[in-house]
Image (cartoon, rainbow, N blue to C red):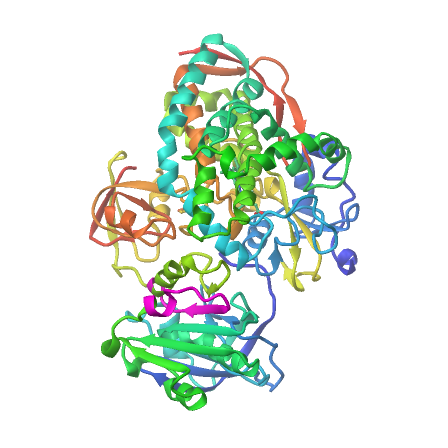
């Protein structure tokens, strides 16, 4: 859905581009006429309006005191579609990009101690937080995981600025998954936890923090869960058992849209996988679940799906429609 | 307010009895006038077109709920009761509580309710269809949710007559302090006391949704101080809304005999009939937001701190979105995307329960009654927020 709210929206110049790690580029954005950029605070993000239908959010990861430029870092996603590919392929120094914001729904609240947990590119919103926590005289530790050391952005800067005892690096190929039990097993009353990273890390951290005081954990997820690329990149078929129709769902359309276009009535409401209205029984085939509702166990049962967002993980699904 | 010169103004009182009784002529003028209209009577901005209403509901960062979703600005006035932790909250606080509530009203928990809801629906339909003539509001719409939702939450049978007056009070309180609100407040004390008491753990059965809220507190998802306020959310938002929704659906069907005939021929259409009725006559007509920053909507500036009223019922009949037959009630229409349940992060958390109630009860009547007709003039029930009926006398013909 396109918002009609034209808050601060400006075309910025890509002033610099460097490779920050394997598959990660860091961009520096400036006003083309050298004007001051809007103020922001650690945790803020901006929307990059890449094309009419393609808007992506990126955290600001530079220094809030620097009003002349913004930094963002973008991970190239594996199968090369969508926003990250656009940024990697098209946003070279000298090009411009439309930017909306900044906004902040991940603000750093005052505390005596912080535990920062980053997974991969999730390091970006935390970088300015580390500076702010240091400036406020708070105690903190950063635990930063990633696939391999080479895939982890800003590692050298972090070590140089903050030293090895505050910055704990945990590439997965050397250390395995983050030891969340050791980090979060015992709630600490005076500590705020800030976590940013892929969905499974957020889920695991949320689970561990359930015994922590409410409000101690801050993550950046609230609206629909960020979903990665679909399992199938091409089209698939859905067979509607009640109506006796077999339809083809192309990659750019939802099952809901295709089924409705074929004249079959399906209830829907949010159309983003959060409300549960379009739940449909699955009679055959494997589902690529992309909703924010089902537990892992329910997903594995493979007997129900939300057709507004979920897709097929096999060539053909059979649905009770 | 600085925008009053730049946007068209409508002098009507949308909370006066005339528009509350029949809002649709006003809605049409509101949509025609502009995407954003000034209501000088309350010094408010208003939106009535689908695109802007939906976009504003979805933009919780600019248009916040924590300053109240009624006329009163909690930034300036003390709320009449401690604010809701869901409805009247913004992220990140809202996120934590909403996640817990999503767990209470999960697809799995709602599925468990179906058998009991269906049994109660069959029983009620048997009795009323055998009677032939009844009141679709006082004998049906007001009876069914109080029974099945009351049981689902885990309330004792005794004292449930307090539920609808409490909801009526809460929904009147989103509007101005007019006669409707003053009257509701005058009767409020004993009702509020009962509701407050029944948010406590020891008043609730151990297996209901109320107990689930308390269990979420035991697990640390929310605090024990938050638990009673969340049970209160269920009791405030879960009854009147569904009562009005069912009443409005029966009204729409009684006014359109060919639509009832379609439903009788295929009772599986019940869920679509309810959805279309919510679009056609939204039980919750209005909710408000407050601009947390200067904003621009459809080219019209909305200064920071402005209250904005969103006409959900008007958005649901905007021909710009729904086409030329937007005013037509048609159970075979695709009503998906209507805003009767809101949109975005505050979208109704009870939606699956409301839909389940409606599906089973309408289905039970549709399979038993070949015809449903008006048997007297329906009487509107006025509320500052809710649109519906106090009485709809009907006659049914058993199949
Ligand atoms: C036909 C029946 C219903 C209608 C038309 C309805 C409508 C709505 C609307 C429009 C909102 C959005 C409010 C906003 O955007 O500020 C909402 C929110 C809410 N509804 Fe419903 N509702 C219905 C039934 C229910 C039921 C059965 C429950 C309880 C089980 C419920 C509980 C809630 C709660 C707790 C919220 C606040 C959610 C949040 O702010 O995150 N509603 N409802
Ligand atoms: S329409 Fe809301 S989950 Fe699919």
Q: Is residue A226 magenta?
A: no
Could one spot residue A135 in this view of the protein?
Answer: yes
- Work out whether residue B131 or residue B259 is closer to the camera in this orientation and state it: B131
Quadrant of the frame with the N terminus of chain B: bottom right
Q: Residue at x 46, y 29 (%)?
A: B151
Q: Position of residue A33 (x, y in %)?
A: 60, 86
Q: Residue at x 34, y 47 (%)?
A: A307
Q: Position of residue B374 (x, y in %)?
A: 56, 16
Q: Is residue A195 magenta?
A: yes
Q: Position of residue A156 (x, y in %)?
A: 38, 88
Count numbered badges in the picture.
0
Could one spot residue A265 in this view of the protein?
Answer: no
Quadrant of the frame with the C terminus of chain B: top left
- Work out whether residue B345 or residue A177 is closer to the camera in this orientation and state it: A177
Q: In the current view of this chain or complex, which residue is farthest to the top?
A: B131
Which region shows up in magenta?
A181-200
Q: Residue at x 41, y 88 (%)?
A: A163
- Work out whether residue B215 or residue B87 is closer to the camera in this orientation and state it: B215
Is residue A139 shown above or below B247? below
- Work out whether residue B286 or residue A123 is closer to the camera in this orientation and state it: A123
Q: Quadrant of residue B334?
A: top left
Q: Residue at x 71, y 59 (%)?
A: B305
Q: Position of residue A251 (x, y in %)?
A: 31, 57
Q: Is residue A259 left or right of residue B221?
A: left
Is residue A31 shown above or below B60? below
Q: In the current view of this chain or complex, which residue is farthest to the bottom?
A: A160
Q: Quadrant of residue A38?
A: bottom right
């Amino acid at each position: 859905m396109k918002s009609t709210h034209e808050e601060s929206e400006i075309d910025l110049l890509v002033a610099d581009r460097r490779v920050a790690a394997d598959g990660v580029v860091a961009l520096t954005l400036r006003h083309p006429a050298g004007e001051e950029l809007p103020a922001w605070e650690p945790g803020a993000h901006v929307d990059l309006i890449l094309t009419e239908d393609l808007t992506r959010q990126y955290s600001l990861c530079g220094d809030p005191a620097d009003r002349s430029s913004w930094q963002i870092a973008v991970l190239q996603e594996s199968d090369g579609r969508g926003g990250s590919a656009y940024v990697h392929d098209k946003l070279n120094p000298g090009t411009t990009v439309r930017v909306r914001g900044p906004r902040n729904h991940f603000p750093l609240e005052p505390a005596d101690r912080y535990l920062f947990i980053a997974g991969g590119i999730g390091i970006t919103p935390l970088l300015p937080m580390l500076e702010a926590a240091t400036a406020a005289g708070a105690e903190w530790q950063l635990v930063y995981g990633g696939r391999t050391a080479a895939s982890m952005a800003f590692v050298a800067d972090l070590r140089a600025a903050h030293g090895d005892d505050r910055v704990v690096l945990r590439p997965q190929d050397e250390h395995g998954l983050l030891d969340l039990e050791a980090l979060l097993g015992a709630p600490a009353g005076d500590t705020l936890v800030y976590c940013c990273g892929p969905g499974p890390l957020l889920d695991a951290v949320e689970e561990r923090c359930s015994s922590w005081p409410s409000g101690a954990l801050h993550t950046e997820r609230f609206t629909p869960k960020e979903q990665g690329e679909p399992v199938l990149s091409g089209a698939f078929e859905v067979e509607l058992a009640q109506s006796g129709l077999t339809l083809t769902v192309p990659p750019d359309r939802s099952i809901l849209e295709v089924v409705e276009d074929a004249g079959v009535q399906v209830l829907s409401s949010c159309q983003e996988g959060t409300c549960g209205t379009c739940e449909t029984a699955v009679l055959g085939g494997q589902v690529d679940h992309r909703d924010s509702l089902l537990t892992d166990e329910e997903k594995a049962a493979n007997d129900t799906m939300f057709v507004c967002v979920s897709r097929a993980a096999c060539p053909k699904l059979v649905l009770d429609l | 307010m600085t925008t009053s010169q730049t946007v068209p103004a409508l002098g009507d009182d949308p909370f006066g009895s005339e528009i509350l009784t029949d809002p649709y002529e006003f809605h049409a003028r509101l949509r025609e006038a502009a995407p954003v209209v000034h209501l000088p009577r309350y010094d408010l901005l208003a939106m009535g077109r689908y695109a802007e209403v939906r976009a504003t509901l979805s933009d919780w960062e600019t248009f916040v709920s924590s300053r109240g979703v009624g006329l009163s600005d909690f930034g300036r006035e003390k709320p009449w009761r401690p604010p809701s932790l869901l409805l009247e909250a913004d992220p990140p606080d809202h996120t934590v509580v909403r996640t817990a509530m999503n767990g209470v009203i999960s697809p799995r928990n709602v599925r468990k309710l179906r058998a009991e809801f269906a049994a109660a629906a069959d029983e009620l339909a048997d009795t009323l269809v055998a009677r032939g003539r009844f009141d679709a509001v006082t004998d049906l719409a007001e009876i069914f949710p109080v029974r099945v939702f009351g049981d689902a939450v885990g309330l004792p049978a005794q004292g449930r007559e307090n539920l609808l007056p409490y909801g009526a009070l809460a929904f009147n309180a989103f509007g101005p302090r007019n006669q409707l609100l003053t009257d509701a407040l005058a009767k409020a004390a004993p009702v509020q006391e009962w509701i407050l008491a029944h948010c406590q753990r020891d008043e609730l059965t151990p297996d209901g949704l109320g107990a689930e809220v308390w269990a979420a507190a035991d697990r640390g998802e929310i605090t024990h101080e938050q638990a009673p306020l969340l049970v209160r959310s269920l009791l405030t938002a879960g009854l009147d809304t569904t009562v009005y929704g069912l009443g409005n659906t029966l009204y729409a069907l009684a006014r359109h005999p060919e639509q009832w005939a379609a439903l009788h021929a295929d009772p599986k259409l019940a869920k679509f009939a309810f959805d279309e009725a919510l679009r056609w006559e939204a039980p919750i007509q209005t909710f408000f937001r407050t601009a947390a920053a200067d904003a621009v909507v459809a080219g019209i500036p909305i200064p920071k701190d402005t209250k904005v009223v969103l006409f959900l019922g008007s958005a649901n009949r905007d021909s710009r979105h729904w086409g030329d037959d937007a005013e037509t009630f048609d159970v075979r229409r695709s009503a998906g995307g209507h805003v009767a349940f809101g949109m975005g992060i505050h979208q109704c958390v009870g939606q699956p329960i409301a839909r389940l109630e409606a599906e089973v009860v309408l289905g039970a009547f549709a399979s038993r009654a070949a015809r449903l007709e008006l048997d007297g003039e329906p009487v509107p029930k006025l509320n500052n927020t809710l649109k519906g009926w106090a009485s709809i006398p009907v006659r049914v013909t058993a199949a």
